Each structure stands twice: as structure tokens, then as C-alpha cells.
Image (tube, rainbow, N blue to C red):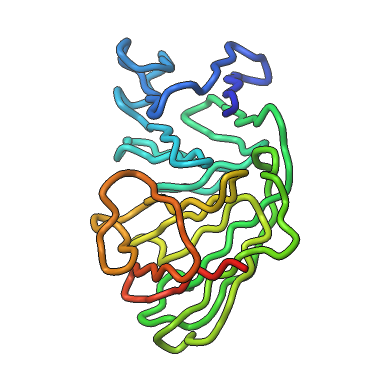
Amino acid sequence: MGKLVVSLDGVVIKEVQITKDKTTLGRRPYNDIVIDNLAVSGEHAVLQIVGADVFIEDLNSTNGTYINGKAIKKQLLVNNDIIEIGKYKIRFLLEDSADYEKTMILRPGASAPTGFGLPSSFGSLPPATPRSVPATIKVLNGAAAGREVSLTKVVTTIGKPGVQVASITKRPSGYVLAHVEGLVRPSVNGQQLQGDSTPLKNGDVVELAGTQMQFQQP
């Protein structure tokens, strides 16, 4: 999945492979990554693997968690991101990298669907076996009804940040929907997602954050 390179004042202290679903960082000795510094909270942050993604979440720490200089609460990590905790800098590295796209269908803070956000390219896992014609997600209701996104990249993230977010991962065996964020899991064909992920079939209707989207695969 990747690794973390912990450094202080430019000197690398340790390297940690990310192998667990959840990896905790903090000052207390029971954390997976222990950073013994008073500026670091006892339980400072946690990294969580969701599908093909790695997210980092600040655990209401005293001094906060920063990604590339910006304070975050929860954020998707991409190749070469710099996590800052106290005076420590932790570089997130993927062993292999390829382009993928994180596409938000609902813009942050929007009260209703307003269209598609701008795509950004990041490092990611090796691409799945390509198909001649990619699958698409089509919005069925709201102000963005009729809009489509081609699932040409390894991971596409849909939903409304801070409310309900899911990811669609392109794998050799097909496309998989996974729950990422939100108290309520997304629904597929009217049935709420029970596990962490489920395969998608042509014509499936996904609903999250009040928006219905149809998965279409040639």
C-alpha cells in the first residue's frame, strides 16, 4: 500500500510500512507509530485504508495535523504528501505510482447538487486492466441531473465531503463501490451497503448525500 518516512530537522528517524487497516500515530507507547514529543497528543491521528485509498484523520489533537502546510480534519493521502505533526514531518510514499483521478460530484458546501468538481491527478496504485470503453456514472436527479463522469482512472470519489462520500475503484474483475465517509452508508438499488464495499453491475443505482447516480458499463 505504501510507507511513511518520519523525519525531524531533515534527518530520517524511521520508515514504517502501512500494512494495517488502521495505523495510529501519537505520543503514547501503544500507538503503531510513536512520536515522543510534547507537541504530539497521546492519540494524535489515524491512517485508515479504504479500498485502494489511504485517509488520515486528526483525532482532535491539541496542535493539529497538517498536510503540505494546511490543517486538516480528514483527508485522502496522495503520493509524496507531507504530514506535519509538531516538528516532525512524515512523507507518505506509494511504492508504485500511476495517475488516477479524484472527482467530487458535489462541490463542498453546496446545499444541492451543482455539478462536477474539477479533477486532479495524483499518484496511486498501478492501473487495473484497461477496458476499451470505460464505465460511467450518470446523475439522475437534482440540479446536476444528466451529467456524466467517465470512470477512466483507478479511483473516482463521489459524494459531498463532510456529509457522505464513497469511492468507485476500477479493478481487473470490474468496478467496486466502497464507503469512505459519513454516518450513513450509500445505497445500491435501494439497499444500504452492508459491508465496506460491493461490486457494481450495469444499471445499478447508487444513492448518497441525496443524489441518485446510475452506474453504466458497456
Indicate whether 202 appears above or below 123: below
Q: Residue 75: give x, y in percent of width and height.
A: 47, 47
Q: Quadrant of residue 131?
A: bottom right
Q: Where residue 72 appears, x then y in whole percent?
A: 45, 48
Q: Quadrant of the C terminus?
A: bottom right
User: Is residue 39 at least partly visible in the picture?
Assistant: no
The answer to which quarter of the image holds residue 165 is bottom left
For the residue pair 130 and 48, the one nearer the viewer reads as: 130
Q: Nearer the viewer, residue 21 or 162?
A: 21
Using the image, determine if residue 185 lies above or below residue 27.
below
Asked whether, in this view, residue 193 is left or right of residue 140, the answer is left
Residue 97 location in percent, x, y? 72, 37
Taking depth in this image into account, of 173 and 183 the one nearest to the observer is: 173
Please give the name of the residue rendered at 39% of the width and 50% of the height, measured from the top-left corner: 198
Asked if residue 104 is positioned above or below residue 65 in the image, the reply reads below
Residue occupying image coordinates x 50% and y 66%? 202
Expressed as whole percent of the image width and height from the top left, the position of residue 109 reads 40, 73
For residue 183, say whether it is visible: yes
